Image (cartoon, rainbow, N blue to C red):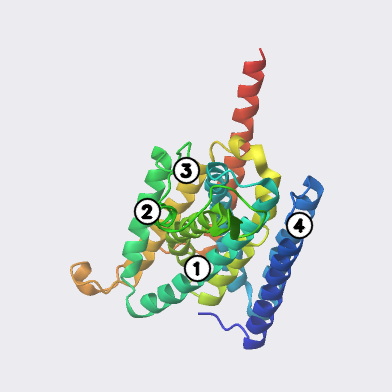
Amino acid sequence: MHEIPGWFEATSLTVFGVLLLADLWFVARRPHVPSVRECTAWIGFYVGLALVYGVALWAVAGSAPATEFYAGWLTEYSLSVDNLFVFVLVMASFAVPRDQQQRVLMVGIVVALVLRGVFITLGAAIIDHFTWVFYLFGAFLVYTAAQLVRGGGDDDEYRENALVRVARRVLPMTDRYDGGHLVTTVDGRRLLTPLLLVFVAIGTTDLLFAFDSIPAIFGLTQDPYIVFMTNLLALMGLRQLYFLLGGLLDRLVYLPVGLAVILAFIGVKLFLEALHENTVGFINGGQPVDVPEIATWVSLAVIVLVLAVTAAASLWKTSRDAARDAD
């Protein structure tokens, strides 16, 4: 935990909360397909906002929490970009009209924030009482990294989960959309539209994403406030990023590998921290183990380097493949 002034935490949460509500209101009032210029402007605004926030955090609380924030924000933002692959599949599977996709994404972001807020609260409480949970977090991240390398998450189509299948079978529903309405009238009957299923699909997908992102961020900082802010600022602007990237997502062919390296690195970092604060009886007699610790600035440097190499290698490969196909 860091000594961050209470007024700074309250002010930042209020400001970003108001921004999120204003964004939600804007989407609800005028659903549309944003232009490239609009998306670029908003993404630049949100990225700049995160950078400025980190500077402000440095000014009021020092370099340690600011470095943790930047490392966590980059990690969460990268995981969010990977999540967009699944969002694309969900939208295509349910044939969501383009002008309604902004609304779906915005609801998904709000649901993700609520779910992650719950996970962060539970995670912080567990870590306070059971430091050995870092062993579990570390093992889970290394396992997730291995799954990414093996291509465990690279499905070409979205498979409905059990909750979506039950909702589709039990609820009175039409197969036609009615703008942004969740309920419509067909032959005098009040029926739910497929938009409800899309919300359920996005919400349950967000829940699965939280299982990856929350252990990862706790590997970089144990301050619940910083953990929440990294998630909040990573998710803000995700909606515009979805429309801006479009086909570019297919060009980031090495993104899963880059994320696997980052998650594995954080998993190892968690193992080392767990050993350093060890209380497990069958490990070194329940005494701390003298192992090296990975500084936060090292974590930040590794994350930046991996993401830069991943992006460059992905764009190089797709450009080379396109040139070869042209020949």
Give the left or right position of residue 194, taking residue 277 as reference: right
Which of 41 and 105 lies nearest the eye of the viewer?
105
Q: CA distance from mark 2 to mark 4?
A: 36 Å
Residue at left 65%, top 51%? 101
Place of residue 75 in the rendered image (x, y in percent of width and height, measured from the top left): 55, 57
Query: Which three-letter amino acid code belongs to the residue tagged 1?
Result: Arg
Disc 4: CA contacts within 10 A as few (<14), some (14-19) or many (>=20): some
N-terminal of the pair, mark 2 or mark 4, is 4
Which of 324 and 290 lies nearest the eye of the viewer?
324
Badge 3 vs badge 1, beta-carbon distance below 8 Å: no
Q: For residue 42, which numbered disc appears in the image?
A: 4
Looking at the rendered structure, the secondary structure element under dot 2 is helix
Q: For residue 247, which numbered disc appears in the image?
A: none
Name the residue that disc number 1 marks. 116
Query: Which three-letter amino acid code belongs to the residue tagged 2?
Result: Ala
Q: CA distance from mark 3 to mark 4?
A: 28 Å
Q: For residue 158, which numbered disc appears in the image?
A: 3
N-terminal of the pair, mark 3 or mark 1, is 1
Which of 312 and 117 lies nearest the eye of the viewer?
117
Q: CA distance from mark 3 to mark 1?
A: 23 Å
Q: Name the front one of labels 3 and 4.
A: 3
N-terminal of the pair, mark 4 or mark 1, is 4
Give the left or right position of residue 80, taking residue 171 as reference: right
